[in-house]
Amino acid sequence: MLGSAWSYRYFILSSIRTEFMGRFIRSRIGGLWMVVNPLVQVSIYALILSSLLSARLPELADQPYAYAIYLTAGILCWSLFSEVVTRCLTVFIENGNLLKKVVFPRSCLPLIATGSALVNNGLLLLAIIGVFAILGHRVPPAPLLLLPALVALTVALALGFGLVLGTLNVFIRDIGHVVPLVLQIGFWFTPVVYVPEVLPAEVRGLLAFNPLFPLIGAYHDVLVFGRAPDLAGLAGTAALALGSLALALVMFRRAGAEMVDVL
């Protein structure tokens, strides 16, 4: 499957480019729309919660926009994870006619969706770096070199979950209605718009069961506090990502033939 996808790498790359260009073909500002929504979301949260939560970030006491910086780093991770999961959830259903009419490796579809999400997230990262520069926040270059590894781990976890759910969604359409609700709950169960210390001790202990908790913390370490993340804390998330990818591969191979018939 991976060999077939590699053989169609130019098809995957051209599809990502076509999708991106087609989305903004009549737009005046083009790809900037991909970063406007998350930045507006950050501005709203920062306006409402900044005065309450900035005091919870003593390491950034000299930063007047400490909470906005913290929030932006978390949004960068969450937006990539949620977009990959959401797009993989419906990628086979949305391309059902294409699967029935054109012969090509089905594994190309989730890779195209993931590639598009990475392009969007890359644009958001550039915008965030620009925002950090305007706010006077400098990220040391050494920890920043670890960011590609964190992005890869985020993609692996999201792709594993997304492929499992996307395959199941072909046969059980209720999955497509449940997952957006779970993601909405997961957003508030992940310390993106708040710091973990604001939660009661008994609730804070439940964060250990959230695989995104150490990943969001690693983004904060790199982009907010300028230090290397806790690699030991990421080991469980990495193991879960590999396990979900392996499960997705098995399910995808076994259900591939029936998938086209159901669609």
Image (spheres, rainbow, N blue to C red):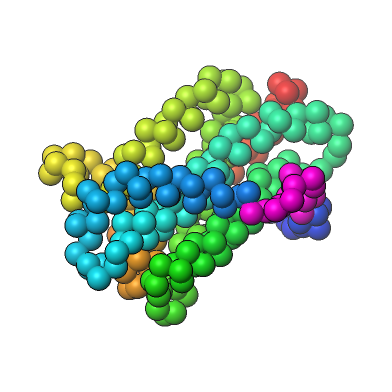
Image point (81%, 58%), residue name: 10
- Name the quarter where the C terminus is drawn: top right
Q: Is residue 202 visible?
A: yes
Task: Say if 173 sits above or below 80 in the image.
Answer: above
Image point (45%, 45%), residue name: 41
Q: Tell me the quarter of the picture where residue 67 sits.
A: bottom left
| 25 with respect to 32 (left or right) | right
> Residue 252 at x, y = what percent?
62, 38
- Hey, which residue is sitting farthest left in the picture? 201
Q: Tell me the quarter of the picture where residue 199 sits.
A: top left
Q: Is residue 241 visible?
A: no
Task: Say if 43 sits above or below 147 in the image.
Answer: above
> Residue 133 at x, y = what percent?
46, 71
Tell me how many marks there are: 0
Image point (65%, 39%), residue name: 253
Which span is picked out in magenta? 16-32
> Residue 163 at x, y = what percent?
57, 39
Task: Say if 35 sits above or below 180 in the image.
Answer: below
| 152 with respect to 69 (left or right) | right
